[in-house]
Amino acid sequence: LMASQLEKYVIRMIADIVGYDPEQSTGIFTFGGTGCNIYGYLLGLRKSIPQTATHGLDTGQDYRFINSQACHYSNVTNLSLLGANIESKLIRTRLTENNDMDLDDLEKQLRACFQLHITVPTIMLTCGSTDTFAIDLIGPVAALRDRLCEEYQVKVKPNIHVDAAVGWALIFFFDYDFDKNPLDINAATLHHLKNNVKRCKDLKLADSFTVDFHKWGYVPYASSLVMIKNRDDLKYLENDGDLYTYFDQETEGHTHLHSTIECSRSASGVFGAAFALHYLGKQGYQLLVAHTLQNAEYFRFRLSCESNVIVIPKNTHGPTVNFRL
């Protein structure tokens, strides 16, 4: 009971910070960022092709999933786990010079699918890629999706899921006063942080997104949460209630049991996330994240001064520093 209450506490807190309606949204703690992103794919699949719940992917309806060439490798392998042919049913969009999703290419791919009546269950975006810390433009992608769905009269919009496993911690800066800069973050770090936060602020427009508290949340493995904007979307994940005859029917609707892809879920991630949020608080996270980014910026600068070192790529401004000797 305590774990369930803490899970709701964390979900409401993240929803409030991001801009989701805490009364309308929900979430599920699950097994790592991979599990969260599986939910992102599955939500779109079940909403757009409900028959997949009982017939798998062999429904006769053609489909394509969409992600970018910069997405985490698990966002490709996850589709294989779901039974999708990743060679023929996955579209990977081109990238811009900022390593984010190319909107022109995305529009081209979406138009091609909609013209041929091919269902697009999920568009998988990234908020903070592992190596380059690329952040896809969530707002423009959502606007493009809505515009094309209206143009082609697509009844069920693709589920926009954001893999924010790495970049989610930027949400603590959504209301930070960058002009006054109360934490006295150095100028170089502040400039890039402000730009990244601006890109991340549209998380509230995503239908679902991934939070890894064990990445940049200072919580032990594994502590991962998939946030869902509309709690009614969980109905699409529900299985036949008769499968759960050994549970008290009075508990139906009070837990996520009928909608989760796991039967047993560890409470360790819930406790870790709840305690970190409570004791660190928003300002504590701001201090930790800013300190990490300042160290990364300084390390990149020092490496760039060495003749036998190449920083790759040069225009990345996240917590990861990649270099070649």
Image (cartoon, helix red, strand yellow):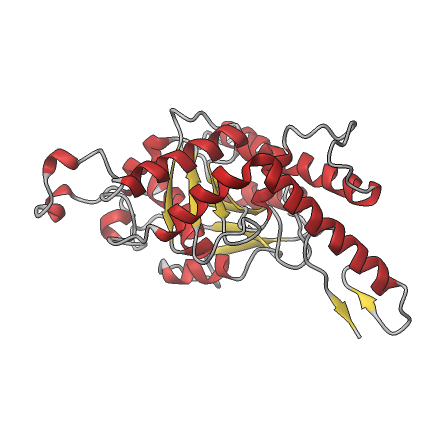
Residue at 43%, 39% (x, y): give it: 227
Residue at 29%, 49% (x, y): give it: 52
Does residue 291 appear anywhere in the picture? yes
In the displayed structure, 74 sits above or below 48; it is below
Single out the residue that lies furthest toward the front: 279
Does residue 121 appear anywhere in the picture? no
Q: Position of residue 181 (x, y in %)?
A: 76, 32
Q: Nearer the viewer, residue 68 or 215?
A: 215
In the displayed structure, 61 sits above or below 222; it is above
Check the picture and name the quadrant holding the C terminus: bottom right
Q: Position of residue 50 (x, y in %)?
A: 29, 42
Residue 290 occupies quadrant: top right
Residue at 17%, 36% (x, y): give it: 252
Relative side of 148 to 81, left or right: right
Q: Position of residue 85 (x, y in %)?
A: 42, 62
Relative side of 185 to 40, left or right: right
Count of numbered badges drawn on the protein: 0
Relative side of 41 to 136, left or right: left
Residue at 82%, 68% (x, y): give it: 310
Q: Position of residue 272 (x, y in %)?
A: 43, 49
Residue 176 occupies quadrant: top right
Q: Nearer the viewer, residue 171 or 89?
A: 171
Q: Nearer the viewer, residue 31 or 199?
A: 31
